[in-house]
Image (cartoon, helix red, strand yellow):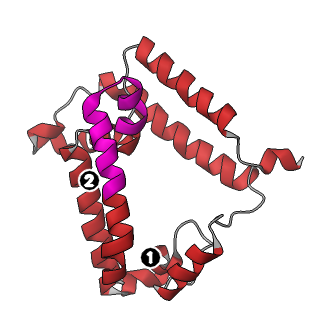
């Protein structure tokens, strides 16, 4: 039964993603998680104060099912299909993260230094999370979608703006991790 705990190989998961995207294209839908966050804001009444969130929620119900499926799938995979929940990263990366103050590197998907209970008492950590969250949200809207929307859905629809956005996402991530992050921590 060890096979059930192993990550799916690319030749299984890749075609499944492609099949999902083909089905979405056939039914005229586009995939992206940030659109679902807009829908949640609209459900919460944000459209009454901000016209941007005044959207037709009925046409977006299917996306909320995607979010529910992602939550349920994540829960099932962590609790029933994962024998080892440690992060599979190289010892050199673990060492580098340890020098930056992340002692949980290689042991947890969400570093306890940023997401543990003690993190909320550190003003610097709270500011980094708030500013980072704002930049991710702003960037996703400014780019017209998030990484999943552009990188999976947009590129599969052969949209040039999605290719440019995806290159920007990756370049921004590399710049942040290699240059800005060490300055912050």
| Residue 161 position within the rendered picture, expressed as x and y whole percent measured from the top left | 25, 34
Neighbourhood count class around disc 1 (C-alpha, 10 Å): few under 14, some 14–19, many 20 upward? some
Which residue lies at the image location 13% right of the left edge and 38% below the top edge? 52
Residue 154 badge:
none
Taking the view exactly as shown, the residue that stands out farthest to the top is: 26
23 left or right, relative to 90: left
Which residue is under mark 1? 114
In which quarter of the view is residue 151 placed? top left
* 1 or 2: tag closer to the N-terminus: 1
Examine the rendered structure and indicate whether residue 102 appears above or below residue 81: below
Examine the rendered structure and indicate whether residue 20 appears above or below residue 48: above
Helix, strand or loop at mark 2: helix
Helix, strand or loop at mark 1: helix
100 left or right, relative to 34: right
Which residue lies at the image location 60% right of the left edge and 48% below the top edge? 74
Q: Which residues are magenta?
A: 149-171
Which residue lies at the image location 37% right of the left edge and 53% below the top edge? 170
Examine the rendered structure and indicate whether residue 162 appears above or below residue 170: above
Using the rendered image of the protein, determine whether residue 104 is visible from the camera's viewpoint: no
In which quarter of the view is residue 78 placed? bottom right
Q: Main secondary structure of the magenta part?
A: helix
82 left or right, relative to 54: right
Gap between marks 1 and 2, in whole Å? 19 Å
7 left or right, relative to 122: right
Decide whether residue 183 is among the magenta residues: no
Decide whether residue 167 is among the magenta residues: yes
Which residue is under mark 2? 137
Query: Which quadrant does the C terminus fall into?
Result: bottom left
| Residue 132 position within the rendered picture, expressed as x and y whole percent measured from the top left | 29, 66
């Amino acid at each position: 039964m060890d096979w059930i705990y192993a990550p799916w190989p690319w030749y299984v998961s890749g075609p499944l993603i492609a099949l999902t995207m083909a089905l979405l294209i056939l039914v005229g839908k586009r995939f992206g998680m940030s659109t679902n966050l807009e829908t949640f804001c609209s459900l919460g009444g944000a459209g009454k104060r901000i016209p941007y969130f005044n959207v037709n929620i009925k046409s977006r119900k299917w996306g909320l099912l995607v979010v529910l499926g992602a939550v349920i799938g994540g829960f099932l995979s962590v609790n029933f299909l994962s024998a080892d929940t440690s992060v599979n990263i190289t010892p050199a990366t673990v060492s580098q993260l340890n020098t930056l103050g992340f002692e949980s590197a290689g042991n947890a998907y969400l570093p306890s230094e940023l997401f543990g209970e003690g993190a909320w008492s550190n003003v610097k950590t709270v500011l980094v999370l708030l500013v980072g969250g704002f930049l991710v949200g702003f960037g996703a809207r400014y780019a017209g979608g998030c990484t999943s929307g552009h990188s999976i859905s947009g590129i599969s629809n052969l949209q040039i703006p999605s290719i440019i956005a995806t290159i920007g996402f990756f370049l921004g991530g590399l710049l942040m991790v290699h240059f800005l992050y060490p300055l912050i921590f």
